[in-house]
Amino acid sequence: MVKLVYFAWVRERIGKAEETVELPGGVATIADLAAWLAARGPEYAAAFAKPEVVRAAINHAHVKPGTSIAGATEIAFFPPVTGG
């Protein structure tokens, strides 16, 4: 089981701030997870329509799409952060 946390417009599109899920076999990377989530329903498809835009963190550390999710207890998804 892994806790998924959603922030900003990712959260708004999915309609929830977090959830705990059991990942199916074959979901090994952040990119795999984003693709699996996008297939879960229209709200997820809307959130992950452009997966290259959505950022991720595993256990509070920013990661790239090809990063393995093995051993992750929490994965967060959020839009790009800009300074100002």
Image (spheres, helix red, strand yellow):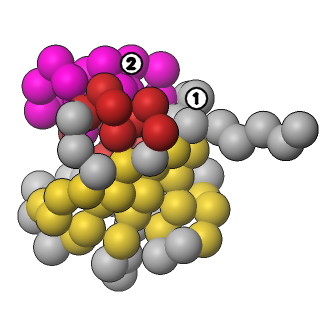
Magenta span has 57? no
Q: Is residue 22 left or right of residue 78?
A: left
Q: Return the residue at label 1.
A: 53
**In the image, residue 32 above or below residue 57:** above
Give the CA distance from mark 2 to mark 1: 9 Å
On screen, residue 32 versus residue 8, left or right, reads left
User: Residue 76's x, y, as percent?
Assistant: 43, 58
Residue extent of the magenta highlight: 37-51
Q: Amino acid at mark 2?
A: Ala
Q: Amino acid at mark 1?
A: Val
Q: Is residue 33 above or below residue 59?
A: above
Please state, as top left, top right, bottom left or bottom right, where the N terminus lies in the image. Answer: bottom left
Q: Are marks 2 and 1 in contact (CB under 8 Å)?
A: no
Location of mark 2 (residue)? 49
Q: Residue at x 39, y 18 (%)?
A: 49
Residue 9 vs residue 69, the one in the foreground: 9
Q: Which residue sits furthest right?
A: 84
Q: Secondary structure at mark 2?
A: loop
Quarter of the image with the C terminus in it: top right
Label tally = 2
The quadrant in which residue 73 appears is bottom left
Residue 54 at least partly seen: yes
Measuring 52% from the left and 52% from the top, which residue is drawn there? 56
Q: Secondary structure at mark 1?
A: loop
Q: Give me the residue at 16% from left, 64% from top.
A: 20
Q: Is residue 39 magenta?
A: yes
